[in-house]
Image (spheres, rainbow, N blue to C red):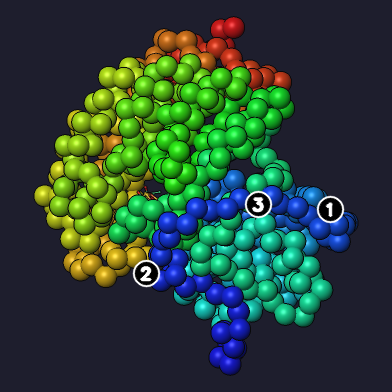
Amino acid sequence: MNKDIDIKKYFRPDLKEARKRTKKMIEQVDFDLATSYQHLGLHKTYLIQTYGCQGNEADSETMAGILELMGFTPAKSEEESDVIIINTCAIRENAENRVWGELGRLKAYKRENPDLILALAGCMPQEENVVQRVLKKYQHVDLVFGTHNIHKLPDYLQTAMFGKERVVEVFSKEGEIVENLPKTRQYKHKAWVNIMFGCDEFCTYCIVPYTRGKERSRSKEDILEEVKELVLSGYQEITLLGQNVNAYGKDRKDGYTFGDLLRDLDKTGIERIRFTTSHPHDLDTKTMEAMRDCAHVMPYFHLPVQSGSDAVLKRMNRHYTKASYLEKLKELKETVPGISVTTDIIVGFPGETETDFQETLALVEVADFEGAFTFVFSKREGTPAAKYEDLTSMDEKKERLYRLNEKINEGYLRGSKRFLNKTVSVLVDGVSKNDETVLAGYTEHQKLVNFKGDASLIGQLVKVKITEAKTWFLMGERVD
Ligand code: 5AD
Ligand code: SF4
């Protein structure tokens, strides 16, 4: 460990700065790769490891796009990579611990391959304590950059490859919206489409508003153009991405909001439109009606509730109550009959009592969720909830998680069973991991289906009759 390192000289994040919000309208600029960088990656290979949410998946596709524009090609293995980028997630401590473990493992590896460029990217570098720790203890990391400066990757690589110094540049605040970024997409039939960046909700447990900055929406023209190009390239499905897609357009102040965008996208010729993720407080009737009217918007909604206790929701700063959440859910189910709804729930938030937890179980019972991501609260340094008194033991929290999951699993099974003997449309993603003759894909309601079929069907929409309903997936037979 080198205690003498001059941390001040690097461009480091500052959580207090990251918390600030200005009314300033965000400018837009176009990405352009300088000619001098266009051959920097010739005969060199890269590998990107991605952790976390779909936002990170989409960012990794942009990083890959930039690298390939520079001449790099994907590496077949770690052994043959010249650049390794770890695109990280900061949402919970266990996500971070996996990255620390990975960085530790790569230390020995880097010793044997001193020419390798090892980069740490994404949400973790947006945290002050992470950058401190990397600078002091992980000297083998050559390059550190955050979520706001992916477009500067060519500059950083140039410096890291030819300069002697490591490059650490993390902007605390968002800059312009960068358009025209190249993308190397993971799939040929389904694509992520960012519609907005950042989050202004400031739920008290969450680090995202600090790591991803202020809410800023892309223009509808840019989004529509991207989707029309995807249609021309043969894509069947898009998933619109944002931390809170229901707030889309609010920052642009021209009255054009998420419901309007869904209606316009429905006319582009794309077969399936999905979106993630939503905040109940911003979900409006206009969006529900657009879902009802647009044939290509899928009947599936992920609507995180987090807790069923009003006291806990208030301390989480969620801006709704159990009753108002259920009211919205009722409107959604009445407007879009048969819709499948899933959620996110945190157990063991500081101060959550057994009675509060019982309220969550009761809400799950009436909400009829068909699935949920459930988490134990994780303390995130810099967020308000990190300072809240937390007297519940980890054993107790884990026990609550177990009880909650039992209930959630009943919902998964109920959601599967309602499709038994029905014929559904499946977008084929690939072959099953366990059996090459079995294909796997998702229904309109986002149910995983396995059925016998040929790999030539990958990327196509097919009709499947459901013959068996399991908790986590459906089995069926192709009928068209
Ligand atoms: N601890 C546990 N879960 C969290 N989430 C966000 N922050 C935390 C945290 N500090 C969960 C929320 C959110 C999902 C993406 O992650 O449920 O909806
Ligand atoms: Fe985090 Fe809340 Fe924003 Fe979701 S809405 S990203 S939970 S602050």
The residue tagged with tag 3: helix, strand or loop? Answer: strand
**Residue 3 percent across, percent down from the top left:** 56, 91
Q: On the rendered image, what quadrant is the C terminus found in?
A: top right
The residue lying at 57 percent from left, 59 percent from top is 175
Seen from the viewer's position, the closer of residues 180 and 68 is 180
Seen from the viewer's position, the closer of residues 97 and 382 is 382
Left or right: 252 in relation to 351: right
Give the CA distance from mark 1 to mark 3.
23 Å
Give the amino acid type for the residue marked by disc 2 in the picture. Gly
Quarter-of-image position of residue 336: top left
The residue lying at 58 percent from left, 27 percent from top is 237
Left or right: 318 in relation to 268: left
Determine contact: label 2, label 3, CB under 8 Å. no
The residue tagged 3 is 29
Quarter-of-image position of residue 437: top right
Give the CA distance from mark 2 to mark 3.
31 Å
Give whichever of discs 2 and 3 has the lower sequence position. Answer: 3
The residue tagged 1 is 71
The residue lying at 52 percent from left, 25 percent from top is 264
- Nearest to viewer (mark 2 / mark 3): 3
Left or right: 159 in relation to 380: right
Give whichever of discs 1 and 3 has the lower sequence position. Answer: 3
Give the amino acid type for the residue marked by disc 1 in the picture. Gly
The residue tagged with tag 1: helix, strand or loop? Answer: loop
